[in-house]
């Protein structure tokens, strides 16, 4: 809910929405593609894979920055398979593996059929798409720095601080490798983050907020995790200093968080309409 609110008031998101840029559809498509893909994984629900494939296929009609998104699905598939192998007994693993393969084949075929005209066009004009591709350390540093460390960062400083905090916290959690494998959720988030930055890494105009718009949802998720972690620590600290009023600590923390989030909304309004 916090991540959704931050996306709704974000200067980055609002700017491209009001410009009516086709790129703004990329975050929408990614969110629903991976929502239904995750639902299919979680419940072995084959229709969810088909719906995910429909959204994924439609993504190829939006903006060229979407073309790298299949890499996220491939890594998610491989990591989820590894998780099944580590955590499930043989009988359950064989059954779930079969369902997983069926689901991903359905997902890939559906997306392929829907995106076929775009794929044919890409194949026929591959040189035009690939010829301007350049990558450099400078582009990578500029793209990674655009969130906090550029002349005009795309995240206001309070959000930028919580983004870094959330990113580091989730990275530490991911690297702990509980149960002998990387957390599938965290692998998914970090792969989404870095894969959707690839168009920015390859851009001659880096940092490019338009080409990297697909990373916006997961940036807001990391930021929300940072905010939640901070306010949870604040609530715990208040409870330690006044252990007789646990309900009061919850209420005060919630009130402070609401005031903080509204202030972010006003700040983003000022950035868009005044600055």
Image: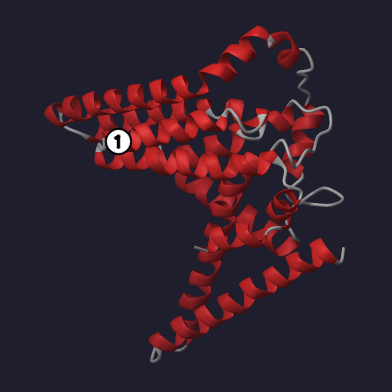
Left or right: where 119 falls relative to 74 = right
The image quadrant of residue 124 is top right
Q: Position of residue 68 (x, y in %)?
A: 59, 26
| Frontmost residue, 12 versus 139 | 12
Q: Which residue is mark 1?
A: 47
Q: Residue furthest left?
A: 91
In the rendered image, the vertical position of residue 124 relative to residue 165, given as above or below: above
Query: Which residue is painted at 62% across and 79% down in the image?
Result: 259
Q: Is residue 112 visible?
A: yes
Query: Which residue is painted at 41% across and 35% down in the image?
Result: 52
Crowding at mark 1 (Cα within 10 Å: few <14, some 14-19, many 20+):
some
Left or right: where 95 falls relative to 168 = left
Q: Is residue 183 visible?
A: no
The image quadrant of residue 178 is top left
In the rendered image, the vertical position of residue 242 relative to residue 167, given as above or below: below
Left or right: where 208 falls relative to 243 = right
The image quadrant of residue 138 is top right
């Amino acid at each position: 809910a916090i991540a959704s609110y931050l996306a709704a008031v974000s200067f980055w998101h609002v700017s491209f929405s009001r410009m009516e840029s086709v790129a703004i559809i990329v975050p929408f498509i990614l969110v629903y593609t991976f929502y239904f893909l995750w639902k299919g994984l979680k419940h072995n629900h084959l229709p969810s894979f088909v719906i995910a494939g429909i959204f994924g296929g439609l993504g190829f009609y939006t903006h060229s920055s979407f073309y790298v998104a299949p890499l996220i699905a491939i890594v998610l598939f491989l990591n989820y398979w590894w998780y099944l192998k580590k955590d499930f007994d043989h009988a359950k693993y064989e059954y779930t593996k079969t369902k997983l393969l069926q689901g991903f084949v359905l997902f890939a075929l559906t997306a392929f059929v829907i995106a076929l005209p775009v794929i044919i066009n890409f194949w026929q004009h591959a040189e035009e798409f690939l010829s301007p591709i350049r990558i450099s350390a400078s582009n990578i540093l500029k793209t990674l720095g655009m969130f906090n460390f550029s002349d005009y960062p795309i995240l206001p400083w309070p959000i930028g601080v919580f983004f870094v905090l959330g990113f580091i916290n989730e990275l530490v959690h991911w690297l702990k490798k509980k149960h002998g494998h990387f957390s599938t959720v965290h692998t998914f988030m970090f792969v989404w983050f870095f894969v959707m930055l690839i168009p920015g890494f390859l851009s001659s105009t880096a940092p490019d907020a338009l080409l990297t718009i697909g990373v916006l949802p997961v940036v807001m998720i990391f930021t929300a995790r940072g905010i939640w972690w901070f306010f949870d620590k604040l609530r715990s600290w208040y409870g330690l200093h006044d252990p007789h009023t646990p309900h009061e600590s919850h209420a005060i923390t919630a009130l402070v968080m609401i005031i903080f989030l509204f202030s972010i909304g006003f700040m983003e309004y000022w950035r868009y309409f005044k600055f």
